[in-house]
Image (spheres, grey):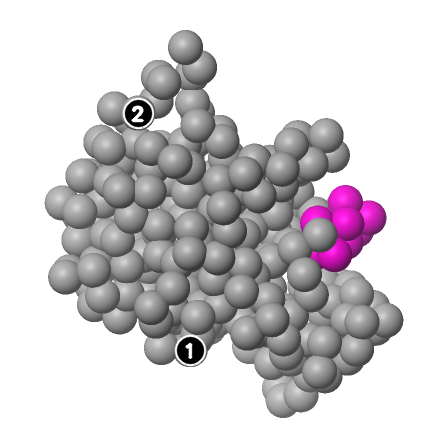
Amino acid sequence: MVCLMTQLLVSVRNADEAIAAAAGGADVIDVKEPHRGPLGCAAPDVILEIARTLGNMNGIVPPLSLALGELIEWQSGDLSSLQSAIQSASPQFLKLGLAEALATHGAASWITEWQRVRMMISGDHAWVAVAYADHEHADSPAIHAVLEFAVQTGCKVLLIDTHSKTGTSLLNQLTVGELQNIRQQTLRNSLKLALAGGVTTADLPQLLPLQPDIIAVRGAVCAHGHRTASVSKDLVQEFHRAMKLLRFV
């Protein structure tokens, strides 16, 4: 019998959803704007409002994670207000996607560009390397390349997600055997593993035996399963309960 200590991360788009997710038992609160893509970056004022809301909560406050969009979105424009909001929010995790990184930077330079963006944000936080299971669709580096990059650059977490959010899911793109191989590699390199991409409670019997550190969801805990709907406290509780029931397998 194996004890699973997998945490539940819930992505939220505003303070009300953050309260619902925390009340439902989320272990990590992730700020994301679903209308802006799989890792859509929220507006600076939204980030600050959610951080303040969590900071004013009683009891144990879940750590904060911020989705920062895709690498290509950090190439131009005035990012000073976003940088300031990120630093003021004091997140525990920061994640940046690599969609279109190969077309924009090429296989030889996306790492250099990623590190440049990383240096733009100061603070005590862990960086999450994001690999898309459907990397060919996303024109992003393959999972093995992102994993190697995560090890080389001192990332703390490898997130496997899906870029497409319509008609696909993590287990549509990768077999359990492939995920098991990835898990073994992360363990060898002292990387935490987070799994996302249309994950539902029906997937938990296959995913939890892999002992990922984090299961990340949004659509599964939103009304009617729609990722652009609102996060429901009751659905978060149901998902958390399902994980707890499968904790010993």
Magenta stretch encompasses residue 151: yes
Asked if one can make out residue 47 in the rendered structure from this viewpoint, the answer is no
**Rendered residue at 42%/51% (across/down):** 171
* Left or right of 163, for residue 206: left
Question: How far is mark 2 from mark 1, CA to CA?
Answer: 33 Å
**Rendered residue at 56%/61% (across/down):** 132
At label 2, the amino acid type is Leu
Q: Position of residue 241 (x, y in %)?
A: 22, 31
Badge 1: few (under 14), some or many (20 or more) residues near its Cα, within 10 Å?
Answer: few
Q: Residue furthest top?
A: 1
* Left or right of 212, for residue 236: left
Mark number, residue 36: 1
Number of residue marks: 2
Quadrant showing the C terminus: top left
- Magenta residues, start to end: 145-153
Q: Residue furthest right?
A: 108
Secondary structure found at label 2:
loop
Residue receiving disc 2: 246
Quadrant showing the N terminus: top left
Q: Is residue 245 above or below residue 118?
A: above
Going from N to C along the chain, the mark reached first, 2 or 1, is 1
Secondary structure found at label 1:
helix
